[in-house]
Image (tube, helix red, strand yellow):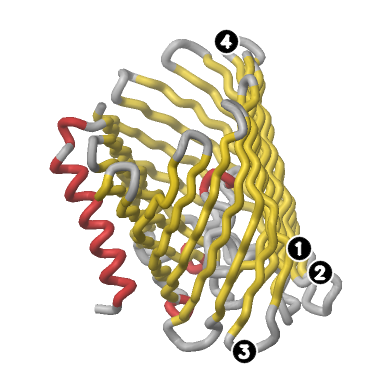
């Protein structure tokens, strides 16, 4: 078994074994559910409209524990999709993250491990159907050595190894070795700053696309009266095995603010990465559109994203949420660039103590190969109306009406899809 597969297997089995052995002394929530969705245009095409029923069986696992020498948390969803008329093969998917830390020397040396999984979209301009999806798993383990930990300053060294594996795009499987050095200086109870530098060596399994990477940035974090804002600004330099070195600005900005009826979140990022990496994460997903796209590519890219969300509680029974994002995938030495603009609107009303009604609208504009002969522009709209009823603290059921449309620049790629869905979920608390 390859090293990367062994690493992932050890981390998964270790996290789940320790979790279930300690189940009685942890915070836990496990949900199981099933749903059936009738789809009138299962291939999402303009012609040859065929219907099918998609059934999904899933389990959501949330476990966490903090002990004197160990701490871990697991948040995973595992689900299986089955098409009753065999329009597509049945598939198992899993997404989420797990973290497991062991404090070998208190306040000095720790073993830190993590695992993350997600469902990606292989081609950004293809429709979101099983043949255009992939399963990606990322596992990392390393040792954190705290060199200095005073009241105001903390200096830590973290060497680590990691592996990325794909179900379909196995040519993008890779192993990584990294070293991170970070210094944090606490100026006051609400303000801290510091410097962080990391280096990484990336080896792809098929021998093409290897590169070395280094990034250094300045860190600043400020606690607000009802939130927090954190910023990192620096530079990334990449030295590929083939080709000229690349460098550019890299930054991260995160802001959260909650007060009375309002909540607000802003995140922005820019970096030079390869297309196999998870850059945005699950928290950035807007609507039902996949966050991670173009994972069939193997190329270095300048990736940027801005994500803004706002929620307002109109009353005890009414909640409005609005989200918008801009992201771009600027692939080096290629016209396979993708720019996306998305908007999401949700309105939820409590009809009674047990019943909620929710209306959701999402819009996505995708521009591929802008200003080239291969240019393609798609406009996707998604509408959903959902009724949810809580029969008890453990049992919930819902029904939903859905409509999805695409207006495409190229002939033959428009479509309309309508569907009806029923589901039930039971939660063990």
Quadrant in which residue 116 is drawn? bottom left
Foreground mark, 3 or 2? 3
Q: Position of residue 211 (x, y in %)?
A: 56, 80
Q: What label sits on residue 316 in the rendered view?
A: 4
Q: Determine whether label 2 and label 1 are within 8 Å by CB.
A: yes
Helix, strand or loop under label 2: loop
- Structural crowding at the residue carrying mark 2, measured as other residues with C-alpha within 10 Å and reported as few (<14), some (14–19) or many (≥20): some
Mark 1 Cα-neighbour bin, 10 Å: few <14, some 14–19, many ≥20? many
Q: At numbered mark 1, what does the secondary structure look like: helix, strand or loop?
A: strand
Residue 84 spot, x, y in % from top left: 35, 56
Q: Residue at x 42, y 58 (%)?
A: 158
Whichever of labels 3 and 4 marks the residue nearer the N terminus, that label is 3
Quarter of the image that includes the C terminus: top left
> To which residue does mark 2 refer?
370
Which residue position holds label 3?
A: 242
The answer to whether residue 137 shows anywhere in this view is no
In three-dimensional space, the C-alpha distance between marks 2 and 4, rounded to whole angstroms, equals 46 Å
Query: Which of the 4 image quarters holds residue 93?
Result: bottom left
Q: Tell me the residue that label 1 is attached to.
A: 367
Closer to the N terminus: mark 4 or mark 1?
4
**Label 3 CA crowd tier, 10 Å (few <14, some 14–19, many 20+):** few
Q: Nearer the viewer, residue 67 or 13?
A: 67
In front here: 60 or 9?
9
Q: CA distance from mark 4 to mark 1?
A: 40 Å
Q: Residue at horizontal 70%, vertical 66%? A: 302
71 horizontally vs 326: left or right: left
Residue 285 visible in rendering:
yes
User: Mark 2 touching mark 4, by CB under 8 A?
Assistant: no
Q: CA distance from mark 2 to mark 1?
A: 6 Å
Which residue is depicted at the point 47% across and 65% down?
179
Question: Relative to residue 171, is residue 116 depicted above or below?
Answer: above
């Amino acid at each position: 078994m390859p090293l990367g597969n062994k690493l992932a297997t050890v981390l998964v089995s270790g996290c789940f074994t320790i979790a279930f052995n300690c189940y009685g002394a942890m915070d836990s929530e496990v949900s199981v559910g099933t749903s059936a969705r009738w789809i009138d245009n299962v291939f999402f095409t303009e012609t040859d409209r065929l219907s099918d029923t998609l059934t999904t069986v899933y389990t959501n696992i949330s476990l966490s524990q903090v002990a004197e020498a160990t701490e871990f948390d697991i948040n995973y969803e595992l689900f299986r999709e089955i098409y009753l008329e065999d329009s597509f093969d049945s598939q198992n998917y899993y997404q989420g993250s797990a973290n497991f830390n062991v404090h070998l020397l208190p306040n000095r040396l720790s073993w830190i491990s993590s695992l993350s999984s997600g469902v990606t979209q292989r081609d950004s301009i293809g429709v979101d159907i099983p043949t255009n999806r992939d399963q990606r798993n990322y596992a990392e383990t390393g040792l954190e050595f705290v060199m200095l930990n005073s009241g105001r300053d903390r200096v830590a060294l973290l060497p680590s190894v990691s592996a990325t594996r794909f179900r379909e795009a196995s040519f993008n499987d890779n192993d990584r070795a990294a070293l991170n050095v970070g210094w944090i200086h606490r100026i006051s109870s609400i303000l801290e700053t510091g410097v962080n530098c990391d280096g990484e060596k990336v080896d792809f399994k098929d021998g093409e696309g290897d590169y070395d990477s280094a990034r250094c940035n300045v860190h600043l974090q400020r606690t607000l009266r009802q939130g927090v804002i954190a910023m990192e600004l620096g530079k990334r330099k990449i030295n590929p095995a083939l080709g000229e070195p690349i460098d550019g600005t890299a930054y991260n900005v995160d802001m959260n603010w909650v007060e009375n009826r309002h909540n607000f979140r802003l995140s922005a990022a820019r970096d030079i990465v390869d297309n196999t990496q998870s850059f945005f994460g699950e928290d950035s997903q807007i609507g039902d559109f996949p966050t991670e796209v173009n994972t069939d590519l193997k190329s270095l890219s300048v990736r940027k994203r801005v994500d803004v969300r706002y929620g307002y509680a109109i009353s005890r029974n009414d909640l409005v949420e609005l989200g918008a994002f801009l992201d771009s995938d600027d692939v080096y030495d290629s016209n396979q660039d993708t720019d996306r603009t998305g908007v999401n609107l949700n309105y939820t009303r409590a009809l009674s103590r047990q019943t909620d009604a929710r209306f959701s609208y999402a819009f996505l504009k995708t521009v591929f190969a802008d200003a080239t002969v291969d240019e393609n522009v798609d406009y996707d709209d998604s509408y959903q109306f959902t009724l949810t009823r809580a029969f008890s603290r453990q049992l919930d059921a819902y029904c939903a009406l859905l409509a999805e449309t695409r207006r495409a620049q190229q002939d033959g790629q428009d479509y309309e899809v309508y569907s009806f869905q029923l589901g039930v979920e039971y939660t063990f608390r």
